[in-house]
Image (cartoon, rainbow, N blue to C red):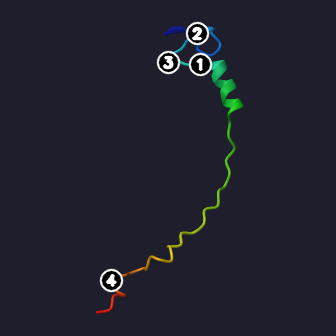
């Protein structure tokens, strides 16, 4: 399919509509994110929640 690149307006022949190959490479280099490890605290229930309210119920 022939069309003009929506980013740089260059005439390209690509399979799908979108930025041309050069623009895609430039976008990948510009917006490349680095992985990082995020520490998530362990789940602790709220103080007003009992683990098993039915078992602790007095008759």
Crowdedness near tag 4: few (<14), some (14–19) or many (≥20) residues, C-alpha within 10 Å? few
Q: Which residue is mark 1?
A: 19
**Pair 2/1: label in front:** 1
The percent position of residue 5, horizontal first and vertical second, equals 59, 13
Up/down of 58 relative to 20, above or below: below
Identify the mark at residue 7; answer none if there is no mark: none
Q: CA distance from mark 2 to mark 4?
A: 69 Å
Furthest residue toward left = 59
Among the two numbered marks 4 and 3 on one chain, the one whose residue lies closer to the N terminus: 3
Q: CA distance from mark 4 to mark 1?
A: 60 Å
**To which quarter of the image does residue 25 belong?**
top right
In front of the other: 1 or 56: 56
Q: Which residue is mark 3?
A: 16
CB-based contact (under 8 Å), mark 4 and mark 3: no
Q: Which residue is mark 4?
A: 54
CB-based contact (under 8 Å), mark 2 and mark 1: no
Among the two numbered marks 2 and 4 on one chain, the one whose residue lies closer to the N terminus: 2
Q: CA distance from mark 3 to mark 1?
A: 9 Å
**To which quarter of the image does residue 53 belong?**
bottom left
Residue at the spot 66% in from the left edge and 27% down from the top edge: 27
**Pair 4/1: label in front:** 4
Please indicate whether residue 39 sits to the left or right of residue 53 in the image.
right
The percent position of residue 14, horizontal first and vertical second, equals 53, 14
Among the two numbered marks 4 and 1 on one chain, the one whose residue lies closer to the N terminus: 1
Crowdedness near tag 3: few (<14), some (14–19) or many (≥20) residues, C-alpha within 10 Å? few
In front of the other: 42 or 29: 42
The percent position of residue 39, horizontal first and vertical second, equals 64, 61
In front of the other: 58 or 8: 58
């Amino acid at each position: 399919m022939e069309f003009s690149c929506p980013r740089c307006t260059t005439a390209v022949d690509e399979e799908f509509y979108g930025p041309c190959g050069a623009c895609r490479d430039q976008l990948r280099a510009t917006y490349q994110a680095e992985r990082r490890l995020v520490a998530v605290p362990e789940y602790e229930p709220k103080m007003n929640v009992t683990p098993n309210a039915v078992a602790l119920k007095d008759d």
